[in-house]
Amino acid sequence: MDQPKPKKPTNVELLNRLRDVLGGRRVSRALGDRLNYSHDLWPRSLLEIRRGEAPYRPDLIIWPETTEEVSRVLKVCNEMRTPVVPFGAGSGMCGGVLPVCGGVVLDTKRMNHIERISEESQVAVCQTGILGIHLEQELNRRGYTMGHFPGSFGISTLGGYLATRSAGQAATMYGKIEDMVLSLQAVLADGTVIHTRTAPRRATGPDFNHVLLGSEGVLAVITRAHMRLHALPAAREFRSAVFPKLDNGLEALRLMLRFGLRPTIVRLSDPADTSVTMKALGLSAQGCLLVMVFDGRSAQIELESAKALEICLANGGRDRGEEPARHWYNHRFAEHFRQSPLLAEQKMVLDTIELAATWTNVKPLYDAVHKALGRQATVLAHVPHAYPEGCALAFTVLCKVTTEDEFKRYDRLWQTAMDAALKNGGVISHAHGIGRQKVRWLAKQLPLALPLLQGLKRRLDPNNILNPGKLSVEVECPC
Ligand SMILES: Cc1cc2nc3c(=O)[nH]c(=O)nc-3n(C[C@H](O)[C@H](O)[C@H](O)COP(=O)(O)OP(=O)(O)OC[C@H]3O[C@@H](n4cnc5c(N)ncnc54)[C@H](O)[C@@H]3O)c2cc1C
């Protein structure tokens, strides 16, 4: 016989039960909060808000402080079939936190403690609501770095990095977030607390950390992480070069990595991006600018940076000295803070389409996407991260979006880019994740794996309360 469905609670019932867990001050139903937590930095949502629309609003916002509170809250919400959207700092650019079924937004930012730093093992144990910048400042004070510097460094949390498989600017040297994490603690939809074991490595079947990494709030709320640390580098060197063509710069990068060099940061611009970057310096340059930063001991990085420059020159590059790299480095976050994705006065939208491919595919991918987007918008592109096997490509698109037709054009831009990526051997996201924005293309990227992931979701969260509408195009709200 069918089990009777639980009665859909009114917001007041839910409010009272959550207040029992968190007290009155850490539960809000204020309209201002509901509007603020109705979006992240996905330009499409911001465009809708600019038109006076906020299509999705949560009913309540909560601020738990401990894993135990998250567990109790999830038990209540699961029992009441109420959606729960984990929320870090809302810096995501693909609608990952959109409360498409309403419900509760669980803001993790009060879970912001560094619980322990083990100097001996070089491990930090942190709650996941801590902002990246605060974590790094505290580590620096103790002589360490985690090495994770996304462009959104000051406005994003550790939990957000883990839940989106983030990659920072120093990924070439320190790796991506998945290389930095040793173990995780997380709370499942029914309130069960799980954790993986902390060790430098394990061979005990598939690594459960990787099930949670990139899970974008649909499988669990990640509440604590053990993170690897590195001693702060003793010295830093800056180098830059300009190449006549993007191919030359890509080849130089590939050869550097093949040689075994690991610059902390590499950033290769296409001609349009070069002209913007150099203009900020009061300089001009024809071609493609490569900025490089090397961290380590001075004797070692002197040798490494000299070898990198030698490879650049052998591949058609011209030495542009330290200044462009130093200037870019010193302003690398300021640019982002100044710039809203919506350039309201000009009625323009600025968006980033970030992809990745192996060295074999990267130039055809760049050409295909650039050509397709260039017909519809102003496009700049750069390589933000490079690895021995290939690199990421970030396209900055600038286009006017005010009318209904222009909205359609904005959607077409994404369609064009995603289709071109899939056709040319790329992946549809290198670091930003999927959210609501790219879910339409997920089945093409993961034709066999997506149904398995959806099966896992059903097993771990049978009532579909955790971040509904993110792992499938159809939105099935819990009822
Ligand atoms: C200017 C700018 C530059 C950026 N540069 C980079 C970059 O260089 N590299 C990069 O990787 N990204 C970058 N991003 C994208 C974004 O900052 C990252 O995706 C970041 O990891 C999101 O963190 P957040 O705390 O803001 O997460 P949110 O936006 O709040 O959430 C993102 C997703 O993670 C889930 N989530 C958040 N916390 C938890 C948790 N504790 N448990 C479970 N799920 C959770 C949410 O439900 C959502 O699905 C950039 C964004 C901007 C605006």
Image (spheres, rainbow, N blue to C red):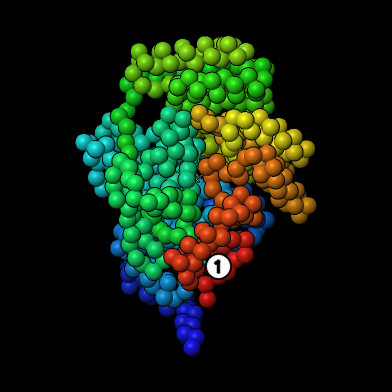
Q: Which picture quadrant has residue 340?
A: top right
Q: Residue at x 61, y 49 (%)?
A: 445
Q: Is residue 478 above or below residue 215?
A: below
Dot 1: what SS?
A: loop
> Is 34 or 324 nearer to us in this picture?
324
Left or right placement of residue 355 versus residue 22 in this view: right
Q: Which picture quadrant has residue 21?
A: bottom left
Q: Position of residue 291 (x, y in %)?
A: 53, 22
Left or right placement of residue 243 versus residue 255 in this view: right
Q: Residue furthest bottom?
A: 1
Q: Residue at x 67, y 56 (%)?
A: 51
Q: Position of residue 121 (x, y in %)?
A: 24, 38
> Is 414 or 472 nearer to us in this picture?
472
Q: Residue at x 53, y 67 (%)?
A: 102
Q: Is residue 28 above or below residue 144?
A: below
Q: Is residue 298 above or below residue 351?
A: above
Amino acid type at mark 1: Cys
Q: Is the residue at mark 1 in contact range of ligand 1, meaning its CB lies under 8 Å from it?
A: no
Dot 1 alpha-carbon crowd within 10 angstroms: few under 14, some 14 to 19, many 20 or more: many
Left or right placement of residue 383 versus residue 86 in this view: right
Dot 1 corresponds to which residue?
Answer: 101
Q: Position of residue 375 (x, y in %)?
A: 78, 37
Left or right placement of residue 299 versus residue 434 in this view: left
Q: Residue at x 29, y 51 (%)?
A: 197
Q: Is residue 365 above or below residue 97?
A: above
Q: Residue furthest left?
A: 120
Q: Which picture quadrant has residue 233?
A: top left
